[in-house]
Image (spheres, helix red, strand yellow):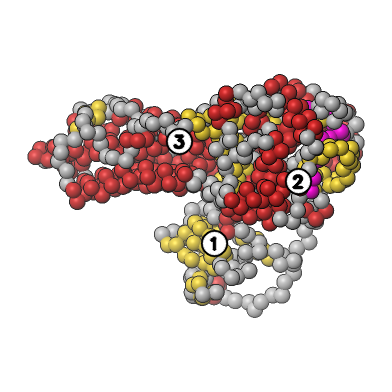
């Protein structure tokens, strides 16, 4: 494998305010898959991740736990690192912003920027979101709340140091315009340009005096460095940057970073603040910042208070590591938010992993043992009209995967790999090895077919290794072979040594799951989490009262709100609507209602109200146009089980045929809610 040179990839460092959920963990799995893929291509990869440990929110969380801030971040950083290791991530450094080498460089960076006139002292008065550690102007708020997390903001006034953002704004705009690959996806770039850069930047607050948990400004110790200058600089301090000009060999080798992988909610900090800091330091900018979408639980952001949080360790305990890696990588679109549910996870494991992949490997190994004692060879007994197309699909997969990975379309790359496995399953159906085995004259053909299957699986497993490393290794072991280098994946079969000796005891890679059993486990997990959350909040409120951060009355009110202790009976007075004419049962019996599952949904162009959904109802897929765009996004519709009127005469809306109707409830304000089954029911189930 030719060495293609250095490649530096980072994740955003995880905030140590609590245990990350599966949506937070998606990023480290994605980064690991990209890092492993680049290594397999021949790059000298350096992969950095870590934890962000300073700020007012951490100080408050520590009080809630009855700990010092350092004790608290030691605990939570340890939890984060354990989860990253549990997921098999191959990082080279886990940096903590409390690391001594990082803290010293932050002080030197701050002093350097101050000495050269980029930082000055003033005072700040504005709206502050503690959750996001960010200041906002009145115009940036949405309904008076934080535009990022939707939480409350409060007035804040204090002495602070400020960075002269305007000084570098034009230079950054020029860089973005001349480097179209710098911010991806393009929609994120447009958002930064139109919402922040082009309207004009405000100078940025880079120190705080209202709390103490941060890196002290060493020439003015009542100030601590504000979290974003501290946290963002980890990307260079972690590889040996020195503000005095004595940077180490790692920095010289790997900077500028090839890829900063971050969540879309912090794109502003990484594509505006961070490059401007680097410009001021006289350092090159990273080559690309990719703002990935969110992984939502059933269309909603995960929240402990909502009780809809899914943790990665719970998922691994139930489904296994590689099943979880596959799901989050495969289900997350390039640009739009992805959806995770326990039901969807079961479906993917059963259909893709157990059936398409696991069954393919198991059948191939079993037939190789049954018909040839475990050793199969290429006997040259090809049937070109059958074999050539399969070989073309398999040997062409690498080029298609490479194209997807070069543009970070990771889900599409996985889809291409599983298209290879599906083609091999089709090859079994085309060649019917069990029929060939009945004719001794076709023994060479049977051996060639089984060899072709083994070789195709090995190529597929080699491509799969960056994404599902444990599974790929198991497949290679079952084939009695090693995985292939990437430069060998474009051809089918080696020039010599054309044989495989498979294991005599094939292992089931992924067992089929019983959905009801999994949902029962999920309910138990969520009930446990809810109880733990309430107990934790009780302790937190007690500690906040003891620290004079909250009154007992406020704590009691929050606890009542959390546990639903107040009596809300009679609050819902209902809605009266104009009654329609009475109908007979025979009239009602003409209507056919069924459960449908929304497979895909998109907005109808040039319409402010319409969404077009592809709804699976039994063996049929109905196209249904609904006027609900103002109440549901296309993304959150996908995966929902809904009530469908299926025998409604087709109608044309906005030039699109609609073949049924989704049933909704409407309140007095015109708000709509889809009617959904209370329990999970199969699509096609009759509603009667």
Q: Residue at x 57, y 36 (%)?
A: 257
The numbered mark at residue 568 is none
Q: Earlier in the sequence, mark 3 or mark 1?
A: 3
Please give left or right for residue 591 compared with residue 609 in the image: left
**What residue range appears in magenta?**
202-215
Name of the residue lying farthest toward the left: 441
The residue singled out by tag 1 in the image is 602
Please tell me in which quadrant of the rendered image residue 295 appears.
top right
Nearer to me, 534 or 606: 606
Check disc 2 and report its element: helix, strand or loop: helix
Q: Is residue 134 above or below residue 220?
A: below
Name of the residue lying farthest toward the bottom: 581
Nearer to me, 317 or 56: 56
Q: Residue at x 78, y 35 (%)?
A: 116
The residue singled out by tag 2 in the image is 167
Q: CA distance from mark 3 to mark 2?
A: 39 Å
Check disc 3 and report its element: helix, strand or loop: helix
The residue singled out by tag 3 in the image is 37
Q: Label 3: few (<14), some or many (≥20) within 10 Å? A: many
Q: Earlier in the sequence, mark 2 or mark 1?
A: 2
Check disc 1 and report its element: helix, strand or loop: strand
Q: CA distance from mark 2 to mark 1?
A: 42 Å
Q: Earlier in the sequence, mark 3 or mark 2?
A: 3
| Quarter of the rendering occupied by the N terminus | top left
User: Main SS type for the magenta part?
Assistant: loop
What is the x, y in percent for residue 98? 72, 24
Q: Is residue 209 magenta?
A: yes
């Amino acid at each position: 494998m030719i060495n293609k040179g250095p490649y530096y990839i980072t994740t955003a460092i995880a905030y140590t305010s609590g245990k990350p959920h599966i949506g937070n963990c998606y990023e480290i799995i994605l980064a690991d898959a990209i890092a492993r893929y680049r290594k397999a291509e021949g790059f000298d990869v350096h992969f950095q991740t870590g934890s962000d440990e300073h700020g007012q929110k951490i100080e408050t969380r520590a009080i809630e736990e009855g700990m010092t801030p350092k004790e608290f971040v030691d605990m939570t950083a340890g939890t984060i690192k354990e989860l990253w290791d549990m997921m098999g991530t191959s990082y080279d450094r886990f940096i903590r912003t409390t690391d001594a080498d990082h803290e010293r460089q932050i002080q030197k960076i701050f002093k350097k920027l101050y000495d050269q006139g980029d930082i000055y002292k003033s005072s700040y008065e504005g709206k502050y979101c503690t959750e996001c550690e960010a200041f906002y102007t009145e115009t940036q708020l949405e309904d008076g709340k934080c535009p990022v997390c939707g939480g409350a903001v409060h007035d804040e006034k204090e002495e602070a140091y400020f960075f002269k953002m305007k000084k570098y704004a034009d230079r950054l705009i020029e860089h973005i315009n001349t480097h179209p690959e710098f911010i991806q996806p393009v929609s994120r770039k447009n958002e930064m340009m139109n919402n922040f850069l082009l309207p004009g930047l405000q100078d940025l607050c880079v120190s705080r005096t209202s709390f103490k948990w941060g890196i002290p400004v060493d020439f003015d110790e009542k100030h601590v460095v504000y979290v974003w200058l501290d946290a963002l600089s980890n990307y260079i301090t972690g590889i040996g940057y020195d503000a005095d000009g004595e940077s180490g060999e790692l920095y010289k080798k790997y900077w500028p970073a090839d890829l900063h992988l971050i969540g879309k909610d912090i794109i502003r900090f990484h594509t505006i603040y961070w490059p401007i800091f680097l410009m001021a330091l006289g350092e090159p900018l990273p080559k690309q910042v990719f703002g990935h979408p969110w992984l939502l639980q059933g269309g909603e952001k995960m929240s402990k208070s909502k009780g809809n949080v899914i943790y990665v360790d719970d998922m691994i305990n139930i489904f296994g590591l590689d099943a979880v890696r596959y799901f989050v990588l495969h289900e997350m679109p390039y640009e739009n938010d992805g959806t995770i549910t326990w039901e969807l996870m079961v479906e993917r494991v059963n259909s893709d992993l157990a059936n398409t992949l696991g069954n393919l490997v198991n059948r191939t190994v079993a037939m190789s043992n049954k018909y040839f004692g475990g050793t199969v060879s290429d006997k040259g007994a090809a049937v070109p009209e059958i074999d050539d197309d399969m070989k073309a699909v398999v040997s062409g997969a690498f080029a298609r995967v490479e194209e997807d990975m070069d543009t970070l379309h990771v889900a599409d790359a996985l889809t291409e790999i599983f298209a290879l496995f599906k083609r091999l399953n089709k090859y079994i159906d085309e060649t019917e090895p069990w029929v060939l085995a009945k004719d001794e004259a076709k023994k060479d053909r049977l051996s060639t077919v089984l060899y072709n299957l083994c070789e195709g699986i090995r190529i597929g497993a080699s491509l799969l290794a960056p994404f599902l490393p444990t599974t790929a290794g198991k497949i290679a072991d079952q084939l009695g072979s090693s995985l292939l280098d990437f430069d060998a994946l474009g051809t089918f079969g080696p020039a010599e040594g054309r044989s495989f000796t498979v294991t005599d005891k094939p292992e089931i890679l992924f067992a089929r799951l019983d959905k009801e059993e999994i949902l029962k486990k999920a309910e138990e997990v969520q009930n446990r989490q809810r109880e733990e959350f309430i107990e934790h909040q009780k302790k937190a409120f007690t500690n906040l009262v003891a620290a004079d951060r909250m009154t007992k009355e406020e704590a009691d009110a929050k606890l009542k709100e959390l546990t639903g202790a107040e009596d809300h009976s009679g609050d819902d007075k209902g809605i009266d609507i104009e009654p329609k004419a009475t109908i007979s049962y025979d009239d009602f019996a003409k209507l056919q209602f069924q459960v449908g599952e929304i497979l895909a949904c998109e907005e109808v162009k040039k319409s402010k109200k319409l969404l077009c959904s592809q709804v699976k109802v039994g063996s049929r897929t109905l196209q249904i146009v609904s006027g609900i765009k103002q109440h549901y996004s296309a993304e959150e519709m996908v995966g929902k089980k809904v009530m469908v009127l299926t025998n409604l005469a087709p109608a044309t809306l906005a030039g699109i045929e609609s073949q049924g109707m989704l049933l909704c409830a409407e309140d007095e304000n015109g708000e709509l809610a889809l009617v959904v089954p209370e329990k999970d029911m199969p699509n096609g189930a009759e509603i009667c």
